[in-house]
Image: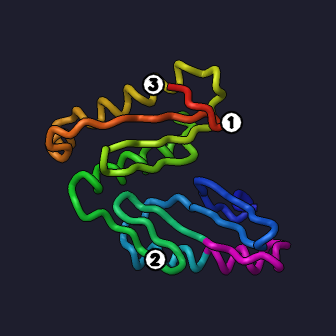
Amino acid sequence: MLDELRVAYEYIEIVPLDKKIFIQVRTSLTDSEALQKYIEKVKRKLEDQTNYKLYAFDISASGSDVVVGDNYTLSPTTDLQKNITQLAHALTEKEKYKVIGFSYKEKPLTFEIRTSASAKDQSHSQQLEEIIHAYFQSPDVVTSLKGETYEVIIYSKDEKRIN
């Protein structure tokens, strides 16, 4: 449905019992006001041009520095949060990484990455870990860690830890 409307998306979740469809769209926009207008446009298109009239659409859009949803705007406040947001955006934007979910907690710094890779695909998890480690060792990013260590947890499409 989104392909027909020419909307790039990161994920779709349909909750039949609640009659809701959650969609995270992908865009190059970076301004929160422009992102808000974009998700409103996407929502109108979906409501007007699809057969899901009984469902409510909950649309969010991510730019490189901000995530905007129907009733919220998330902007990183520290250099580390900004770098994590950029990493999450880079990993979820490229299909070759097979990243379908990215979350983190700050204490202790832990990244949880959900992929569409199979549980047997150990080389894929190693590749992701190498990318993350290289990112945090780059000169522009390493200072935001302030010497803090981190853990990376990678899950397969069937929710099994693969690293």
- Residue type, label 1: Asp
> How far, Cα to Cα, is label 3 from label 1?
19 Å
At mark 2, the secondary structure is: strand
> How far, Cα to Cα, is label 2 from label 1?
30 Å
Left or right of 55? Residue 57 is left
Q: How is the image coloured?
A: rainbow
**Residue at 31% in and 51% down:** 106
Question: Magenta stretch: residue 48 in it?
Answer: yes
Mark 2 sits on what residue?
72
Badge nearest the viewer, 3 or 1:
1
The dot on residue 58 is none
At mark 3, the secondary structure is: helix
The dot on residue 158 is 1
Percent x, y for residue 158? 68, 36
Rate crowding at label 2 as few (under 14), some (14 to 19) or many (20 or more) other CA atoms within 10 Å: few
Question: Magenta stretch: residue 111 in it?
Answer: no
Percent x, y for residue 67? 43, 66
> How far, Cα to Cα, is label 2 from label 3?
33 Å
Mark 3 sits on what residue?
127
First of labels 3, 1 by sequence position:
3
Q: Residue 151 falls in which quadrant of the image? A: top left
At mark 1, the secondary structure is: loop
Q: In the displayed structure, would residue 34 be above or below residue 137?
A: below
Q: What span is colored magenta in the figure?
A: 42-58
**Residue at 75% in and 65% down:** 15
Left or right of 111? Residue 97 is right
